[in-house]
Amino acid sequence: MMEPFQKLTESTLELKKWQQMIPGLKAGFTTRNGGFSAPPFDTFNLGLHVPDLSADVISNRRKLADIVQMPLGSWVSGEQTHRTNIHTVAECDKGKGSTAYDTSLRQIDGLLTSQTGLLCTAFFADCVPIFFLDPLTGYIGIAHAGWQGTVHHIAQKMVERMQTAGADTADICVAIGPSISHDVYEVDERVINHIPQALFDKTVTVQGNNRFLLDLKQLNAEILLQQGVLRHNIDITNYCTFRDNQLFFSHRRDQGETGRMLGYIGYGK
């Protein structure tokens, strides 16, 4: 399968196939390169909730706004608390979380919209970015899925919200973005106990001594398949945030002292 996230600039990867399919769509994921932040946030940290200099983060965000051609005032962010709450973004949400973390949408990990001139954004450093597109209704979205969001089915809940808005599951396209890969994501029974037995063999490798390797990307894909999303409509990246250290921040690899990449999706005016 062709890599869905293609290099646009040193700072950005784009969902090229989606953008070619839908005129005006902006969808992609940032790298750690080409920004203003100092170590350990070097250099293109987009997260305001880490102890980087806010001025540097805002400079990085303004650079991304120029690349994507979506002004910072059109960005909308959730607080991201590893839950499964989803918000349908409207004009009144413009700018929430764009220049100050405390203005982010409270306790929100999933964003959906069908309106133009809004950029749904979310932040990552190993957790799974899941992008959604229904070409017929025009609904688009992004979800932040760490292990908690994954096992509590935020991907399924995003699809259900799109169905409520009129989407047919057979039309929904999903892209699973750069995140930590199976071979380096070791977890314990506390996490594994949440994995349904039917999905265990497809997503878990037993290491012994109460240690397991978990494939978060594939687990989200399997949950989407169970929900009725068609396999050929699910694209999964080959990028790994842990392994690809020249491209990405990784919370686990960098032992918590690191920056954040940003996933974005929206329609330009």
Image (cartoon, grey):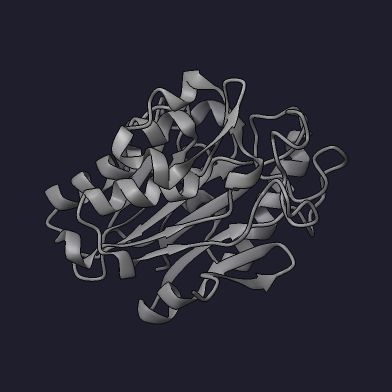
Horizontal and vertical percent position of residue 269? 39, 68
Query: Is residue 257 rendered to the left or right of residue 222?
Result: right
**Going 49% across and 29% down the picture, which residue do you hit?**
103
Residue sitting farthest toward the top: 190
Q: Against 2, is 148 above or below? A: above
Horizontal and vertical percent position of residue 84? 34, 31
Query: Is residue 13 rendered to the left or right of residue 57?
Result: left
Horizontal and vertical percent position of residue 165? 15, 52
Depth check: 248 or 19 in front? 248
Q: Against 156, is 51 above or below? A: above
**Going 60% across and 48% down the picture, which residue do you hit?**
181
Depth check: 229 or 28 in front? 229
- How many numbered badges does the structure rendering display? 0
Depth check: 204 or 113 in front? 204
**Going 20% across and 55% down the picture, which residue do you hit?**
228
Q: Is residue 90 visible?
A: no
Query: Is residue 40 rendered to the left or right of residue 81?
Result: right
Residue sitting farthest toward the front: 208
**Going 36% across and 44% down the picture, which residue do you hit?**
111
Q: Against 12, is 209 above or below? A: above
Task: Kindly indicate the quadrant of the structure image that contains residue 3.
Answer: bottom right
Horizontal and vertical percent position of residue 158? 28, 45
Residue sitting farthest toward the right: 39
Q: Is residue 127 visible?
A: yes
Task: Kindly indicate the quadrant of the structure image that contains residue 18.
Answer: bottom left
